[in-house]
Image (cartoon, grey):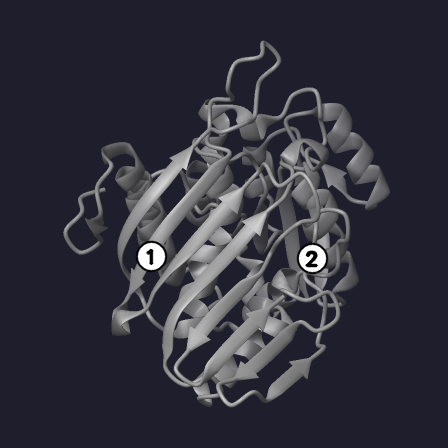
Amino acid sequence: MINVGVIGCGKIAQTRHLPEYTANPQASIIGIYDMNPQRAGDIAEAYHTKAFGSCEELLKNEEIDAVSICAANAAHCELSVMAMEAGKDVLCEKPMAVTYEECCRMVSVSERTGRALMIGHNQRLTRTHKKAKKLIEQGEIGRIISFRSTFGHGGPESWTVDSQKVWFFDKNQAAFGAMADLGIHKTDLIQFLTGEKIEAVTAYIGTLDKKGEDGSPIGVDDNAVCIYELSAGIVGTMTASWSFYGKEDNSTVLYGSEGIMYIYSDPEYSIIIEKKGGERICYQLDSIQTNDNQTSSGVIDSWIECLENRKKPEISGEFVLLSMKAVFAALQSAETGRRLVLSEVEL
């Protein structure tokens, strides 16, 4: 049995971490902490657990083996480091941290303390993405030449627990916007699917539509469009947006030398392969999660299995570091208007 604590009880904790821990027979929620005492008390009562008065108090509890960090982006590094230094294994929500230096620090502390560090990049855990990776490795569409990957919806306003105070729009708390919220998923996913690393990036990251209460543009980006150049000569685009005011788009299309693979592009089939010769192969494996249609992410089950068997997390901080470097390089590319080679960039 793995005893866990949850730090931060906003939407992601309420929708994913807490119910998924409850559903896992090998996990027990020992306590939670939230900056809002009323929210903490209500959630503690709902989950029959304890609301701690501070995160420090929670981390001192010797019963707790591991914690989920579900606080705002800017607090991820500090809280994760505190937890690992206190002897706790850490599952941290994405984005891993708000600077590359902070990400490296988290990995370094994990290595030094011997505590597990996993990041909540759930997309690679879906049945469809796992199957797609196997099909790619089997050569079903030949050599991958290019791709386009998209994650867009109408924004986090309906997702946050306080729609009147959207912390996602506050640069001090979030650091960056759609790129941190959505683009990180696709940056990680494309490397997972192809087995190749991002080597260079050219990006536009900016605010096209979202306004604050005073009518001025929000303090973070609401759209990101990146050209990613991968090893093996693969080139493609990654788009993240908070201004898709219709059906959520969470699709990826891979263009290969022997055909095309459509992932989560069709409402009926989660993978469609169209061969060069005209053959069409369809798979219906699952439906991608949306803000309005939540299913189990698989993150908690993977996390608990890792801790039970004392093995390296499936989505380790060390692996995610590769994706975070690409994300921070994209931000720098957007600021400078230049194509950046990751091996040459200083972050």
Within-10-Å neighbours for mark 1: few <14, some 14–19, many 20+:
many
The amino acid on which the numbered mark 2 sits, given as a three-letter code, is: Gln
Image height of 44 relative to 194, above or below: above
Q: Which amino acid does label 1 sit on?
A: Tyr
User: Mark 2 Cα within 10 Å, few/some/many (few <14, many 20+)?
Assistant: some
Q: Residue at x 67, y 71 (%)?
A: 270
Where residue 118 sits in the image (x, y, percent)?
Answer: 49, 58
Residue drawn 32% across and 69% down?
A: 234
Quarter of the view holding residue 191: bottom left
**Residue 157 sits in which quadrant?**
top right
Q: Mark 2 points at which residue?
A: 289
Helix, strand or loop for disc 2: loop
Q: In this view, does 41 lie to the left or right of 125?
A: right
Q: At which x and y percent is residue 205?
A: 39, 37
Are the residues flagged by discs 2 and 1 in contact, CB closer than 8 Å?
no
Which label lies toward us, 2 or 1? 1
Residue occupying image coordinates x 47% and y 42%: 180
Q: Determine whether, in the image, residue 311 is placed left or right of residue 324.
A: right
Q: Is 132 in front, or is 112?
A: 132
Nearest the viewer among 315 and 30 is 315
Find the residue positioned furthest to the front.
Answer: 278
Vertical comparison of 234 with 297: above or below: below
Q: In the drawing, what numbered circle is on residue 228?
A: 1
